[in-house]
Amino acid sequence: MAKIILTGDRPTGRLHIGHYVGSLRERVKLQNSGTYDKIFIMIADAQALTDNADNPEKIRQNIIEVALDYLACGLDPEKSTIFIQSQIPQLPELCAYYMNLVTVSRLQRNPTVKAEIQSRNFEASIPVGFFTYPISQAADITAFQATTVPGGEDQVPMLEQTREIVRKFNSTYGKALTEPDILLPSNEVCQRLPGIDGKAKMSKSIGNCIYLSETADEIKKKVMNMYTDPDHIRLSDPGKITGNTVFTYLDAFCTAEHFKRYLPDYDNLDELKTHYQRGGLGDVKVKKFLYAILMEYLEPIKKRRTELEKNIPAIYKMLQDGSQKARAVAAQTLKAVKSAMKINYFDDDELIKEQVKRFQR
Ligand code: ATP
Ligand code: MG
């Protein structure tokens, strides 16, 4: 069976370091590994509109921001098809058929949607499109017959929902769809990087982010103001690691090499943590270390982005070409789906023969 990746991001803002460790870094690795037959990367503008219906301009502006971040991180349109969700009309069509296979109570149990309803203050009035976006996501994934979906932990319920839809579809109508697997980052902290406030997941809609394209000054300011242990006041105070965002980020980003370069007095993160817990290690020193590490990752991304920004029309052209390619693939799946559902009236010779016979009686 062909190995196919489908994954994507909502154009609700520039991409952040949570995207980088949660999905983007993995995608680039997989893309360059050559072990996948096809890779589709989707800018999910239609999904972004489900909770931004009154602000289409925000979505419009962020399409190019996300595309720039993709290319700056190393996604290569020669190897990965990058496209815009709304340009593929087959996706909402598939979604309409899948909606018949999912109950309202099943959607209500989705923990990611529940958390997002809360964070967007939708409790009193949830847009129907937002409530049903897990079904639309199943359409996105299955349209490309994806076998693998790299993503963060918040995507686990979406993949479960997709797998259920695939099983239901295939058992009801005959096999036309592929059951996908999620690919989570192996480092657990990377599956759900918290925001700089130390509270919720880092998320564009909350704004608690370090963006990939930020300036060194902005990043420094954010790191220096980051949430640590509120009881770690004096240098000599023992400090807590759990819930200390600076250490969580170090868990996600730092390697033994970084210690050799910036903090040679320590061999590894465990030693640094032990010192912090014992007391005698200040927040500023740990934050400076984190800043230096983040800049190692982000500086080359920023540099490439600045270059890419010089030719914006080329990026729109890349998106247009990618969308055209994606449309052709989704059309094949839709055809197979309609044929399995027996709603392919005009290319089914058997149907016409049957009906001729029926009316000959
Ligand atoms: P929004 O607030 O608009 O939902 P977001 O910041 O949650 O934006 P998405 O576009 O919804 O970003 O997510 C795109 C991908 O990035 C998904 O695979 C998601 O799991 C992953 N991702 C997003 N935030 C994080 C995070 N903080 N840690 C790890 N992965 C993340
Ligand atoms: Mg999200």
Image (tube, grey):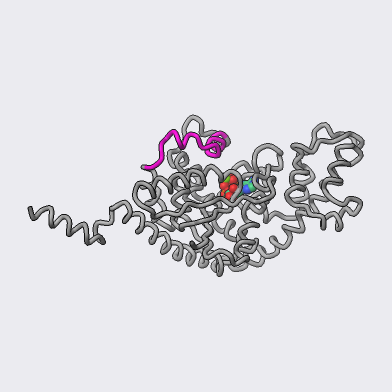
Count the labels in the image.
Answer: 0
Q: Residue at x 78, y 52 (%)?
A: 254
The residue nearer to you, when weighing 182 against 110, is 182
Using the rendered image of the protein, determine whether residue 13 is visible from the camera's viewpoint. no
Q: Which range of residues does the magenta coloring cover?
A: 101-118
Where in the figure is residue 146, as x and y percent of width and height? 49, 56
Q: Residue at x 84, y 36 (%)?
A: 239
Where in the figure is residue 121, as x and y percent of width and height? 54, 33
Left or right of 93 in this view: 133? right
Q: Residue at x 68, y 42 (%)?
A: 194
Left or right of 356 in this view: 135? right
The residue nearer to you, when weighing 108 against 43, is 108
Q: Is residue 170 magenta?
A: no
Locate residue 205: give its quadrant.
top right
| 256 vs 131: above or below | below
Where in the figure is residue 186, as x and y percent of width and height? 67, 50
Left or right of 324 in this view: 268? right
| 156 vs 329: above or below | above
Where in the figure is residue 145, as x and y percent of width and height? 46, 57
Q: Is residue 116 magenta?
A: yes
State whether the magenta stretch is mostly helix, strand or loop.
helix
| Residue farthest along the left direction in this orientation | 361
Locate residue 353: give its quadrant.
bottom left
Q: Residue at x 36, y 47 (%)?
A: 97
